[in-house]
Image (cartoon, grey):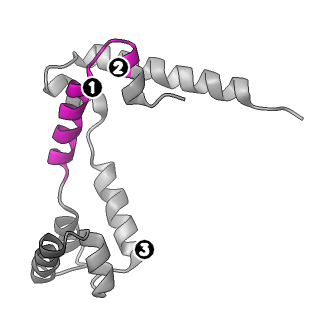
Amino acid sequence: MLSLYEFLMEKGSVSAADLLRCMDYRRWLLPFIGSIAVKRGLMSAEEVVRVVGESEFTGRQFGEIAVEKGCLTVEQMRALIREQRSMMKPLPFSLDALGILPLELAEELVREYDQSRIASTSSTRVTT
């Protein structure tokens, strides 16, 4: 099954370069997990700064270090990641904001993709 990104490229709606630009834009809009942790009272700003410093020095991920140092539990880190992902703007809004596709067309293509996934899922189900 094609991903949404592959579907859009296959349809000729967007180029790979446009999608990369869109992915960068969407990630740029996301709040930093450390900031979310501070807002939720899970870490202090000082702890976040120390973890970021170590992350930049070692190249290891923020969450890995925060858990290792006991600043966050694995479950808290997972919850922060879920919260961060829930804040991501839907792809059609980003495509529109960057002038790649008008919002209406982007939403229509996403609906078409969703329908094709539903159709392929129901056609591959085995009944007993």
**Sequence-wise, which precedes: disc 1 or disc 2?**
2
Amino acid on which disc 1 is placed? Ala
Question: Residue 12's spot in the image, x, y percent?
Answer: 33, 12
Which quarter of the figure is the N terminus placed in? top right
Cβ atoms under marks 1 and 2 closer than 8 Å: yes
Amino acid on which disc 3 is placed? Glu
The residue at the point 15 percent across, 46 percent down is 28
Instruction: Give the foreground label among 1 and 3.
Output: 1
Tell me the residue that label 1 is attached to.
16
Q: Nearer the viewer, residue 58 or 112?
A: 58
Identify the secondary structure beneath mark 3: helix
C-alpha distance separating marks 3 and 2: 36 Å
Which quarter of the figure is the C terminus placed in? top right
Circle 2 packing at 10 Å, graded few (<14), some (14-19), many (20+), is: some
Instruction: Count how many numbered circles sit on residues in the image.
Output: 3
C-alpha distance separating marks 1 and 2: 7 Å
The residue at the point 32 percent across, 84 percent down is 68
The label on residue 75 is 3
Identify the secondary structure beneath mark 1: helix
Q: Is residue 110 left or right of residue 103?
A: right
Amino acid on which disc 2 is placed? Met
Tell me the residue that label 2 is attached to.
9
Q: Nearer the viewer, residue 82 or 16?
A: 16
Question: Does 9 appear above or below 22?
Answer: above
Magenta span dominant secondary structure: helix
Residue situated furthest bottom in the rendering: 70
The residue at the point 27 percent across, 18 percent down is 14
Magenta stretch bounds? 8-30
